[in-house]
Amino acid sequence: MNTQNLRIAMLAFPGMQPLDFFGPYDLFDAAGVEAVVVAGKAGPVQVDRLLSMTAEYSFEDAPETDVLFVPGGHGVTDCLEDEACMRYLRSANHGWITSVCTGALLLAAAGLLRGYRATTHWRYIDLLELGGAIPVRDERIVTDRNRVTGGGVTAGIDFGVALLATIAGEETARLAQLALEYEPAPPFGGHPSTADAATVERYRERTEARLQKRKAEMEQAIARAPQP
């Protein structure tokens, strides 16, 4: 597909993880793909304490696009309680439905991953089962039919390259990756399979309360959703 004919709807919300969003966004921009930003209201979105961005469309006037992209972040918990956001996800008309990090929890709660293989941040991957998804723990990017999900935060760049290769062709993806000089070489392991056990355990302890809160909010969001 010619990139000039592609349009991607990128969800924005307060408390989203900036790198979840801007890693893929930079790749889409480098590839010449039109990315439009959708939020509860058009206008400024205060992403975190320092960063604000502009949403071009609200949920009500968002255009049809070829791809829906959902980032993660701390704000996912509030989105699960926001029926307007969940209604937009459930009703949006897109050829491809995608996410990075805990954005997959929103897709799962909206019923969009039921019966699909999917991944998310390793700490929250068990929560995907609440929405009927099939968690995949050993793949950084998971593609199942027209669903593409990426792992935690930095996986968004890998996700962006993989999605471009799928929908716009490998040459386009290679050029975009080169434009960003994406050649990672981290000094430490960034996944439970490569990080030291003590670090993994400390992170589990730090995030236990958030995990339980997200689980409760997912259960409530799923209970509120219209039955298929």
Image: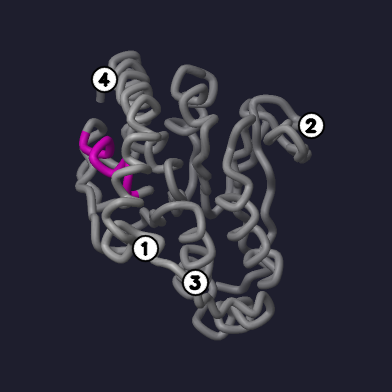
Residue 141: image x %, image y %? 37, 63
Which residue is at a point 60% across and 46% down the rendered structure image? 10
Rounded to the nearest angstrom, the CA distance separating label 4 from label 3 is 44 Å
Q: Residue at x 53, y 26 (%)?
A: 85
Q: Earlier in the sequence, mark 1 or mark 2?
A: 2
* Residue 10 horizontal side relative to residue 169, left or right: right
At label 3, which amino acid type do we have? Pro
Query: Would you say 68 lies left or right of 36 here?
Result: left
Q: Nearer the viewer, residue 99 or 157?
A: 157
Q: Nearer the viewer, mark 2 or mark 3?
A: 3
Amino acid on which the number 2 mark rests in the picture = Pro
Mark 1 closeness class: few <14, some 14–19, many ≥20 residues within 10 Å = many
Q: CA distance from mark 2 to mark 4?
A: 34 Å
Q: Is residue 3 left or right of residue 183?
A: right
Residue 124 falls within the magenta-colored stretch: yes
Magenta-colored span: 122-129
Q: Nearer the viewer, mark 4 or mark 3?
A: 3
Sequence-wise first label, 1 or 4: 1
Mark 4, residue position: 227
Label 3: which residue?
A: 186
Q: Residue at x 64, y 64 (%)?
A: 28
Chief SS of the magenta region: helix
Q: Which residue is mark 2?
A: 44
Q: Earlier in the sequence, mark 3 or mark 1?
A: 1
Locate residue 55: give its quadrant: top right
Question: Dots 4 and 3: beta carbons under 8 Å?
Answer: no
